[in-house]
Amino acid sequence: MALEEVEILIIGAGPSGCVAAGYLHKMGSSIKVVEKSKFPRLVVGESLIPRVMDHFDEAGLLDALNSYNFQIKPGARFIKGDVINIFDFSDKFGEGRDWTWQIPRADFDYAMTQELERKGVDIQFETTVTAIEFDGSESVTTLIDKDGNERQIKAKFVIDCSGYGRVLPRLLQLDKPSQLNPHSAIFSHVVDINRPEGIEGTQISFDVLDTEVWLWVIPFSNGNTSLGIVANTDFIEELKENGSTARALEKAINLSDFYIKRFAGTEFLFEPVHLKNYSAAVTKMFGDGFALTGNSSEFLDPVFSSGVCFATESGILAAKLAYREVHGENVDWQVEFADYMQRGIDVFTTYVKEWYTGNLQTLFFHQPENLDVKRKICSVLAGYVWNEENPFVKKHDRVIKSMAYLLQQKMID
């Protein structure tokens, strides 16, 4: 069996794998990327947050991605009945970028891999990892390509960026139940024939239909829009009736007073995709010779668009640490990687949990707005969840619940 040797093997060519590969290529490291799918391919995660722009910049991808004219996302809108709350990323607590993109992931991921290949990065598509063995400071990964040919790669380090494929968690039995309640989603794209002019036509929105039920609307620069319904899994199953995902999404759109005129009766560009009980977790984020990034370690919920941010944050951090390790430095993966990532995950986990309890929604939709509170929450929504100067980061486990309680008491009084 053919054996290839590299310093670092990257599994997966999504955002996490691409920023890791971009950084390592800049550093002159010997790398290979293997990807199970053929690109472009359909995947969820179409709303980015500003923190990811730092990672694309560090990986040398930002200029190339800018040339594609993806839809600019300057903030996000949350709707509940007659109350609308718009978070402007330029008006937030602390430093940080003030815009990002709304992107068809098929086009976006394809653009990243094309730029990496143009730079000379070796990416092998339609290649499946079937086994991996770790022996001290090296690993041997067994692969099968689209033609059924089996080969092996020896690497000093493996970064698992496989996303929902969760390659190493599956092969090494690292999966564990998520701490979040089960939620599911159904989404598709439509040709946005009734798109209004101006900001209304391009505004990303989250329409809250009930405490645990919300509709996403993500307009793209190509004239299409992503529509998705997120709810507790039982509600999604009820919407499906006879098993039709298309019918379920149609019914969800009809529940939205805000969007029913714009999207009712619109044909879906592909059969709506059902993502069931998508939250995931692992027993550990790293081991001897490997690190898990993005969705291959933790995935929370799409409500605050944190998925790609955690993917790129962990992807580029794992690349930096792996580079140091294979070049002879001692790396404390627990402190520098797992503990660091867990701090951000804990913050967003609190926000997701308190969204579905209704406490965070109380803060979002209370009138009149508290602009100071809004700026601090906006910084979290922009992805700056490691900035502990922000009390809504440092005290995330208490501040939302406490403020919601005070507001609810005022309404009672």
Image (cartoon, rainbow, N blue to C red):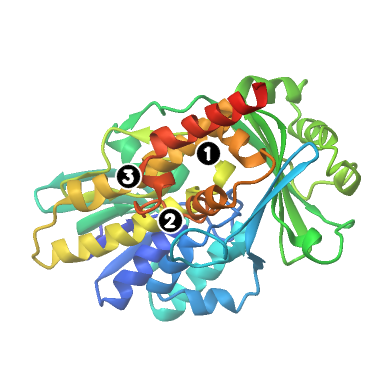
Looking at the rendered structure, the kind of residue marked 3 is Arg
* Residue sitting at x 46%, y 61%: 51
Q: Which quadrant: the C terminus? A: top right
Q: CA distance from mark 1 to mark 2?
A: 17 Å
In the image, taking residue 104 as reference, residue 335 lies left or right, namely left
Pointer 1: what residue? 301
Pointer 3: what residue? 343
How many numbered marks, from 0 up? 3
Looking at the rendered structure, the kind of residue marked 2 is Tyr
Q: Quick one: label 3 or label 1, which is nearer the N terminus?
A: 1
Which SS class for mark 1? loop
- In this view, the mark in front (3 or 1): 3
Q: Are marks 3 and 1 in contact (CB under 8 Å)?
A: no
* Residue sitting at x 59%, y 31%: 407
Q: Does any portion of residue 337 appear in the rendered image?
A: yes
In the image, taking residue 163 as reference, residue 360 lies left or right, namely right
Instruction: Judge whether 386 appears above or below 94 on screen.
Output: above
Q: Quick one: label 2 or label 3, which is nearer the N terminus?
A: 3
Pointer 2: what residue? 384
Q: CA distance from mark 2 to mark 3?
A: 11 Å
Q: Quadrant of residue 130?
A: top left
Query: Residue 8: horizontal and vertical position, in percent?
Result: 25, 62
Query: Residue 77: horizontal and vertical position, in percent?
Result: 68, 51
Query: Residue 221: horizontal and vertical position, in percent?
Result: 72, 67
Q: Are marks 2 and 3 in contact (CB under 8 Å)?
A: no
Instruction: Judge whether 280 appears above or below 382 on screen.
Output: above
Q: Quick one: label 1 or label 2, which is nearer the N terminus?
A: 1
Which SS class for mark 2? loop
